[in-house]
Amino acid sequence: MVKLFRFLKPYRWELFWVLLFLFAQSIAELSLPTLMADVVNNGMMKGDTGYIWKFGAYMLLVALASSFCSIVGSYLSAILGVGLGRDIRDSVFSRVESYSLHEFDQIGTASLINRTTNDVTQVQTLVVMGLRFMVYAPIMCIGGIIMAYSKDQQLTLILAVVLPVMLLMIGSLAKVIVPLFKAMQIKLDRVNLVLRENLTGIRVIRAFNRLESESRRFKDANRDLTDNAIRVNKIMALIQPAMIIIMNLTSLAIIWYGGIRISQNIMQVGDMMAFIQYAMQVMFSIIMVTIMFVMVPRAQASAIRINEVLDIEPGINDPVQSITPGIQKGLVEFQDVTFSYPGAELPAISNITFTASPGEVTAIIGGTGSGKSTMINLIPRFYDVDSGAVLVDGVDVRQMSQKELRAKIGFVPQSPVLFSGTVSENIRYGKPDATGEEITHAAEVAQASEFITAMKDGYEAQIAQGGTNLSGGQKQRLSIARALVRRPGIYILDDSFSALDFKTDARLRAALKKETTTSTVIIIAQRVGTVMDADRIIVLDKGQIVGMGSHKELMDSCVVYREIVSSQLSEEEIA
Ligand code: ADP
Ligand code: MG
């Protein structure tokens, strides 16, 4: 929690004013009962109407001043709280953006969303309330006791009995409630996780008739959260009536004992009334402080979760001094590269060495799980190699700035990702300043223009979140167009033809070839037909290169390749 206080720094002036106004408010409120005692003792009891009017007006002024301070104080602390929330959210978000994929796996998407939203709100609420209570409550409590003592010392004994009882009660309630509060965030994470999975996986859930079990899963998580919240609120609900009873009993005791003292002429009526008000103020401030102490653990848990996000150092960083390659062509080299995922026993790929030159098509083929995607994810530096090096234009990717490196690459991921927006916005994603012509050209090369123009609004047609209103092949072609519009030096196509029919596949490859004559093209594919006429085919098996060369060479030399080919082509096609 304390660590997050650094976010208060830009708000030091607001902070100063909030504290000042709250201070003024509490002083004003403390002086009101004394003024009232004066009015009662010196005005009412003596029948001095002039005195009543005069001090009555004073009281009104003080009350107005206190309301004014309260309003301004609340307003400023609200500004401060909301601003603080925004700043923390901003910095959590930008930290998450700098994460490499490892760190994403580490915390999980649902939790990251929660931490950016709900957890920040918890901290924000506590800061706003805390500010109020921190100044207001101690002044009211200590000031109230002093003022009460000054009114009548003997009556103060009542407070000396009541306050410890009250503290004891609140303390024991807090002991029960604090762990429940802490559990809240974790249970909320769980609800979010299940909800997210349900929303994104709704097709699969329906197809496999898992609606019931899924809704049971959600209900369980939801009930868990609800039960916890209900338990918390039950206890919280207990606090209020208990406090009211204690307060009323206290008033009663003061009136009874005070009455005796008044009849003995030791005390004045006004002082007794003021004493009651001071007692109430003291007790109220104690309740306030306890509410805050109950809230602190929850916000503390949230603060820890936020700090966790902020403290993770992204595993992939720009070098202190980045090197810009002299040549700008798109040469990709792997030098004895080995890489394993964290926690995995065996490396996902090992001892990979090859060169993909500009103007050439390098194809990678291999069974599922053989490490193809892993291999090409190393080029844009989504992950760092364990040993060996990946070089682009002769410079190790770890020595380049990530921005510069990725600007060279047109990346088409294995599962196409589209964003909500229009078709042209999605293609323009690859090059923000692309002209309309460039966009239509890219779509034409990607064999996408036909289905785009067939859509109702053509290039301005809306794409749903995640591209759910397009077919798999259409999504693939749009994400290819998005890469093409950049005209990068390196094209990486991860199994991007898998959902296309053979005819479109062939047409796309022919168009692509014309478009990429000076670029390095790396294609991952499952179909032999797609890779056959590549300049170089790399055959991957269990993370290792088992063959490299042209189709012809591999047919002669590589057993794995021959097996793949014969599983897909008929005898005469092979011949
Ligand atoms: P391919 O693209 O050839 O089908 P991948 O490169 O995706 O294969 O996967 C290679 C291996 O790495 C698989 O065994 C897979 O289980 C593992 N793997 C892939 N992605 C991850 C990840 N994010 N974390 C841990 N292991 C992974
Ligand atoms: Mg793959």
Image: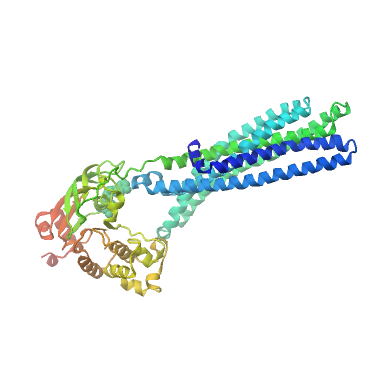
Residue 342, position in %: x, y?
Answer: 31, 42
Residue 375, position in %: x, y?
Answer: 24, 50
- The tally of labels here is 0
Residue 546, position in %: x, y?
Answer: 15, 50
Q: In which quarter of the image is ligand 2?
A: bottom left
Q: How is the image coloured?
A: rainbow
Can residue 396 be seen here? yes
Residue 435 vertical placement versus 228 (above, below): below
In this picture, residue 504 sits left or right of residue 61: left
Say which residue appears at 10% left-offset and 60% top-offset. 552
Residue 395 vertical placement versus 506 (above, below): above
Residue 135, position in %: x, y?
Answer: 62, 36
316 or 503, nearer to the observer: 316
71 or 542, nearer to the observer: 71
494 or 237, nearer to the observer: 494
In this picture, residue 346 sits left or right of residue 249: left
Can residue 111 be seen here? no
Residue 308 vertical placement versus 433 (above, below): above
Question: If the image is split into quadrants, where does the C terminus sit?
Answer: bottom left
Displayed quadrant of residue 28:
top right
In this picture, residue 526 sits left or right of residue 192: left
